[in-house]
Image (spheres, helix red, strand yellow):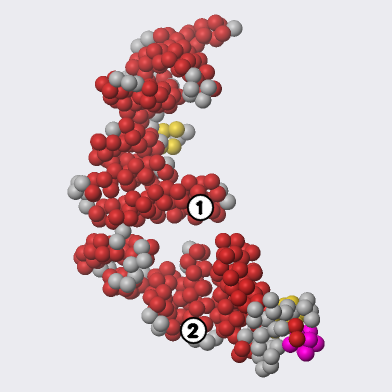
Amino acid sequence: MKAKVLLFLLVLGAGFNLFAINTTGFDKLVPQQQEPKYGKDSVKCITNLSLYIEPYKYWKQSRYKSDVVNDAIKPWIYVFNNCPRSSQNMLIHGVKIMDYRIKNEKDPAMKEKLIDTLLMVYDKRMKYFPTYKGRDQVGKIMGDKGVAMYKYRPSEYQEAYKVLKQAVEKQQNKAKGAVYIYYFRALTRMAQNGEADAAEVIDAYDNISNFLDANIKKYKAAGNTKKVEINENVKGSLESMFEPFATCDVLVGIYQKKFDEHPDDVELLKKITRILDEKKCVESDLYLDAVVNLYKAEPTPASAFLIGKLYLKDEKYDKAMEYCKQATTMEDQDKVFQDYMYLAQIYKYKNNSEQARAMALKAAKVNPQKGAPWAFIGDLYAASAAKCGNNDLTKLVAYWVAVDKYKKAKSVEPDMAESMNKLISAYQKHFPTKEVMFFYNISDGDPYTVGCWINEKTTARSAK
């Protein structure tokens, strides 16, 4: 049966070869300048395709550990050299074969030739198979090639950088994590050797961070924790490489020049505010100038948010409230959460505990997995205890509901357990004593409603 299938393939291959060579009347189907799919000898091409694929399959089944791959090398080389258009899989498999040979080759000169062949595999795939299922795949292949260039020839990082830069520009947020890492590694190396400007490093960091943040947000929404972790790990690697370039003095020095030249460039203003905010360089005059200009040019909720933060920091609470209220309609829900927490703080500073609680509850609604709003409300209740009572019992009952909120905080965000347990332990000591509770005819476990502005139901508990 196998012999019949092979014979059929050989005949079929011969037919394709004749079709490709005899272009008379078929110009629209097969361009004359394009080499035949199965090369000049289609029978030999298909024979070698068959000869390489069988041992390759066994090699793959062995998880690329068996030496049966050696039986695939010679026929694979024939197909690669004589009919590379015949199979995209042949080129994909070629990457595995060449990687294997490079890693196992002892002779340095031969290893270099094998690396050259590996890079040619990527080039031929881009040439003959630039699309897959109608979608461009040149950027993806280029990224793989750039990573291989850097890994196997790290001293030629400048050449690898050129390829990786094009790959990132083509793929944007769809590139592999390794592509971002090696691209940035090559660029930072160039900057350290005086072959690139620090501004290029900062711009590249900003662009890649945006791609990764977009991916993290997308995968979180989809519940894909594995992809979230991958993108976060890539971002962590990026951060460590960026650290030497991330000092406030360096960032401000680079962007102050750009700001002075183009103070109304909205994209530049967004970049300045984003990077300085992320790197906590908000003390600079540049940050304030950029935020204000951004709001003037594009009065969006996002820019109002930035200004509100600055006024809050300067304790200008009325101004801060004005801008933070405008920011609650931002699309970025993480920032909306933060904005409501800022509003909660503002109302707290203005001694309006009810509104402070209302803003914290809105923050909790935006992100139910965060414990900060409940901890904030617990702090409000604890601070109000003495003000909300007129006797030995009522001056202490607010601690009951404060502890309730601390327990709520650690239940929704387990990472807060340690800090919340400390507060719980501290405030349980301020609960009314059994004697005080007995005097007011209250026992442990009784339902109780805390009055004042708090107005919450809880359970009576004696001091511990």
* Residue 325 within the magenta-colored segment of the rendering: no
Q: Nearer the viewer, residue 368 or 111?
A: 111
The kind of residue on which mark 1 rests is Lys
State which quarter of the image contains the C terminus: bottom right
Q: Judge whether residue 264 can be spotted in this image.
A: yes
Tell me where the magenta segment starts and ends, as one range.
436-442
Q: Is residue 461 above or below residue 195?
A: below
Mark 2 element type: helix
Q: Residue at x 37, y 9 (%)?
A: 41
Q: N-terminal of the two: label 1 or label 2? A: 1
The kind of residue on which mark 2 rests is Tyr
Q: Residue at x 55, y 54 (%)?
A: 221
* Residue 437 within the magenta-colored segment of the rendering: yes
Categorize mark 2 by other alpha carbons within 10 Å: few (<14), some (14-19), many (20+): few
Image location (x, y in percent) of residue 34? 33, 21
Mark 1 element type: helix
Q: Which mark is residue 218?
A: 1
Q: Is residue 390 left or right of residue 82?
A: right
Q: Residue at x 65, y 78 (%)?
A: 429
| Cα gap from disc 1 to disc 2, whole angstroms | 36 Å
Q: Residue furthest left?
A: 194
Q: Nearer the viewer, residue 395 or 99?
A: 395
